[in-house]
Image: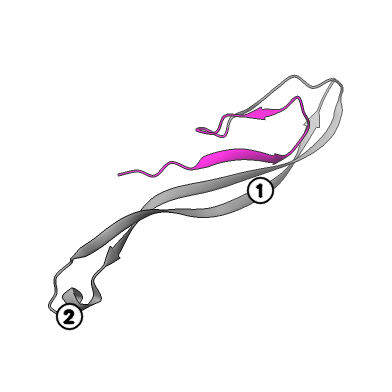
């Protein structure tokens, strides 16, 4: 099983978008210059609750599962837009 992160553009210009599945940035800038942005990634994983009494006897007894969100992890970037 492969977990896939979800990407978001936490900070950036209005013309810039991000694909949540791939993290691909796209857009058409209005002018040349520097643009600061912050990309974040989160990961949802299934977490199991295990019966600690069963572990004593080397058994793995799941009591239930729940989705857990890991992150966000952030990356600050600066794009240089050329004319």
For label 1, the residue is 75
Residue 13: x %, y % from top left: 78, 32
For label 2, the residue is 56
Of 82 and 59, which appears nearest the observer?
59
Q: Is residue 10 left or right of residue 69?
A: right
Position of the C terminus, as image quadrant, is: top right
Of 9 and 51, which appears nearest the observer?
51
Coloring scheme used: one colour
Q: Is residue 14 left or right of residue 2?
A: right
Residue 59 lies in quadrant: bottom left
Identify the residue at horizontal 44%, vertical 48% (top origin): 44
Residue 35: x %, y % from top left: 81, 35
**Labels 1 & 2 near each other (Cβ < 8 A):** no
- Report how far apart the C-alphas of labels 1 and 2 lie in the structure: 42 Å
Identify the residue at horizontal 67%, vertical 28% (top origin): 17
Identify the residue at horizontal 58%, vertical 52% (top origin): 72
In reply to whether residue 32 is colored magenta, the answer given is: no
Question: Up-down: is 19 above or below 43?
Answer: above
Q: Residues within 10 Å of mark 2 (few under 14, many from 20)?
A: few
Question: Up-down: is 83 above or below 65?
Answer: above
What kind of secondary structure does the magenta stretch mostly adopt? loop
Position of the N terminus, as image quadrant, is: top left
Q: Residue furthest front?
A: 63
What numbered label is drawn on residue 16?
none
- Secondary structure state at the residue bearing disc 2: loop
First in residue order: circle 1 vs circle 2: 2
Residue 65: x %, y % from top left: 31, 56
- Which label sits in the foreground, 1 or 2? 2
Question: Up-down: is 18 above or below 42?
Answer: above
Q: Which residues are magenta?
A: 1-23
Q: Residues within 10 Å of mark 1 (few under 14, many from 20)?
A: few
Q: Is residue 44 left or right of residue 36?
A: left
């Amino acid at each position: 099983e492969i977990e896939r992160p979800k990407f978001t553009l936490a900070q950036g210009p209005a013309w810039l978008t991000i694909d949540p599945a791939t993290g691909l940035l796209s857009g058409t800038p209005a002018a040349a210059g520097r643009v600061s942005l912050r990309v974040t990634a989160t990961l949802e994983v299934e977490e199991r609750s295990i019966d600690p009494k069963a572990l004593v006897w080397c058994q793995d007894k799941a009591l239930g599962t729940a989705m857990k969100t890991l992150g966000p992890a952030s990356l600050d970037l600066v794009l240089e837009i050329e004319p």
